[in-house]
């Protein structure tokens, strides 16, 4: 069974958080949500959570770092596998299924995606970021929003007390302790680069990101984007 954890500072992404959870075809799951901004409405999230099975919502003071919020969420989780979701990205229905199968097949301690689809809202472009990094063991570079790992590794490493770069430091600690990190394929996930100023904590220029991408399609139709990135094939363990 898998515990999905999602830390958020954005009240307006409630629907996206629940939708990504609800859409996963993997049945044996729970969702742990951590609200990390004082002005967020905890009761509205808890009321929404009542519509789903196995969802818990907690609120921590905003001075608590993102890394600490992740550690707290893992402590609250009940299951042996942890999947880290971002509040504003897209996770296709078979995302969890394929990630868990990849974890089992590779015998890795942590899996994720180093090559990912990115959709640039302002530029209206779907692209592949950092191509050629699929289906291989790596030491760093896994996108934090795609991490799926064995909970037991948290006995060895913890997320640092940081709001920026906590995923990178966590992966470095994993590598330092010789934990096995595997980059799976790019399917079933899209990092959404939205046009709102100040939205992304990863405040890198879109032009710089596009410079490390291969364009796939120019479109404003997000349904088309979902169809392109989704791999709904069930594969045997």
Image (tube, rainbow, N blue to C red):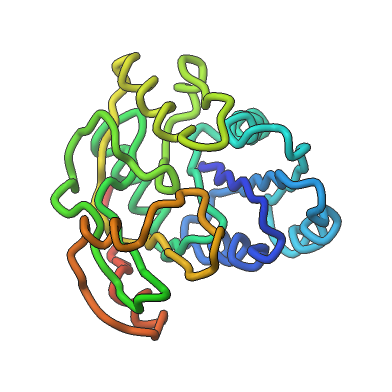
Total numbered circles: 0
Residue appearing at x 32%, y 84% in the figure: 219
Question: Of all residues shown, which one is farthest toward the left?
Answer: 132
* Up/down of 216 relative to 183, above or below: below
Residue 18 x, y percent position in the rendering: 62, 62
Residue 161 x, y percent position in the rendering: 58, 25
125 sits left or right of 71 in the view: left
* Up/down of 94 relative to 202, above or below: below
Front-most of 99 and 157? 157
Q: Quadrant of residue 137?
A: top left
Residue 59 x, y percent position in the rendering: 77, 43
21 sits left or right of 46 in the view: left
Front-most of 81 and 113? 113
218 sits left or right of 74 in the view: left
- Does residue 157 appear anywhere in the picture? yes
Residue appearing at x 24%, y 35% in the figure: 106
- Does residue 235 appear anywhere in the picture? no
24 sits left or right of 44 in the view: left
Residue appearing at x 64%, y 28% in the figure: 75
Residue appearing at x 29%, y 32% in the figure: 140
Q: Quadrant of residue 162?
A: top right
Front-most of 190 and 203? 203
Front-most of 41 and 147? 41
* Up/down of 230 relative to 169, above or below: below
């Amino acid at each position: 069974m898998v515990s999905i954890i999602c830390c958020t500072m954005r009240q307006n992404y409630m629907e996206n958080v629940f939708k990504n959870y609800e859409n996963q075809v993997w049945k044996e799951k729970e969702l742990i949500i951590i609200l990390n901004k004082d002005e967020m409405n905890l009761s509205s999230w808890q009321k929404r959570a009542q519509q789903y099975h196995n969802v818990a919502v907690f609120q921590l003071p905003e001075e608590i770092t993102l890394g600490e919020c992740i550690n707290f969420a893992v402590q609250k989780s009940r299951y042996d596998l942890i999947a880290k979701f971002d509040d504003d990205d897209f996770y296709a229905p078979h995302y969890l299924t394929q990630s868990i199968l990849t974890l089992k097949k590779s015998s890795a301690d942590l899996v994720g995606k180093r090559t990912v689809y990115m959709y640039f809202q302002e530029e209206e472009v779907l692209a592949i970021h950092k191509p050629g990094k699929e289906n291989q063991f790596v030491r760093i570079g896994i996108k934090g929003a795609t991490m799926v790992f064995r909970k037991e590794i948290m006995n060895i490493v913890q997320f640092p007390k940081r709001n920026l770069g906590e995923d990178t430091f966590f992966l470095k600690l994993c590598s330092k302790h010789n934990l096995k990190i595997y980059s799976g394929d790019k399917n079933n996930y899209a990092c959404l680069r939205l046009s709102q100023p100040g939205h992304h904590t990863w405040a890198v220029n879109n032009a710089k990101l596009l410079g490390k991408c291969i364009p796939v399609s120019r479109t404003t139709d997000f349904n088309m984007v979902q169809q392109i990135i989704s791999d709904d094939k069930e594969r045997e363990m």
